Image (tube, rainbow, N blue to C red):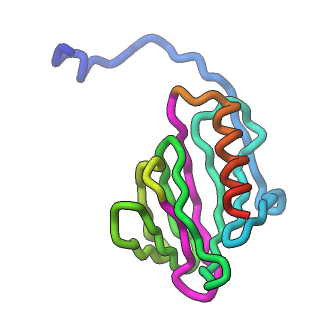
Amino acid sequence: MHIADLVTVNLEPQVPSARFAVTRKPDQAFTEADHYSFAALCGNLQRKRMKPMITRVRSETAEHPIEKFSHDGEEFLYVLKGVLLIRTEYYQPIRLEQGDSMYFDSTMPHCYVSGTKQEAEAFVMWLPENSQSEEDVDDVVRLRRSFLS
């Protein structure tokens, strides 16, 4: 790459795709599982790269321990309410409180656990790999739902 490529402005007009989606709070539909529930945001927009969702996380119980799960892509989360413990395969658990965020490689086995007896809530953005088709992504979501229930 030439140094000039770093500072050159592309003057060719970009054609907007004119795609957008809106999810109103009353329209958020949560899918329930043992310790999690999640609502896809802007799920009606097809062929999008990012998968935004609101995830609600309950505390772990002796009868139902929360197991780590891995999938392709990268994940970002921002704690909206409560305390989240993020458990990963390779690191000590990370405690996140309201306003804290984390970004990690989703291929690393991981799980979310509420750090208190109250439910925690986070905005989660999953970015699948470029090579994953829409069907592959849907399969991961279905697998995650069945794994968590």
Vertically, is 124 above or below 134? below
Q: Main secondary structure of the magenta part?
A: strand
**Residue at the outermost front position:** 63
Vertically, is 78 above or below 74? below
Write the start and end of the magenta stretch as one range.
110-130
State the image coordinates of residue 75 (x, y, percent, origin top left): 49, 51
Pick whichever, 64 or 94, lies toward us.
Answer: 64
Vertically, is 114 above or below 13? below
Residue located at (40% from left, 13% from top): 11
Residue located at (72% from left, 55% from top): 145
Describe residue 93's horizontal placement relative to residue 137 as left or right.
left
State the image coordinates of residue 147 (x, y, percent, origin top left): 67, 58
Pick whichever, 25 or 118, lies toward us.
Answer: 118
Pick whichever, 137 or 42, lies toward us.
Answer: 137
Say how many tags the image has: 0
Instruction: Residue 121: name its quadrant.
Output: bottom right
State the image coordinates of residue 46 (x, y, percent, origin top left): 72, 32
Residue located at (56% from left, 66% from top): 67
Describe residue 25's horizontal placement relative to residue 51 as left or right.
right
Instruction: Residue 37: name its quadrant.
Output: bottom right
Residue located at (78% from left, 60% from top): 31
Quadrant location of the N terminus?
top left
Pick whichever, 131 or 61, lies toward us.
Answer: 61
**Residue at the outermost left position:** 3
128 drawn magenta? yes
Quadrant location of the C terminus?
bottom right
**Residue at the outermost top position:** 12
State the image coordinates of residue 40 (x, y, percent, origin top left): 71, 52
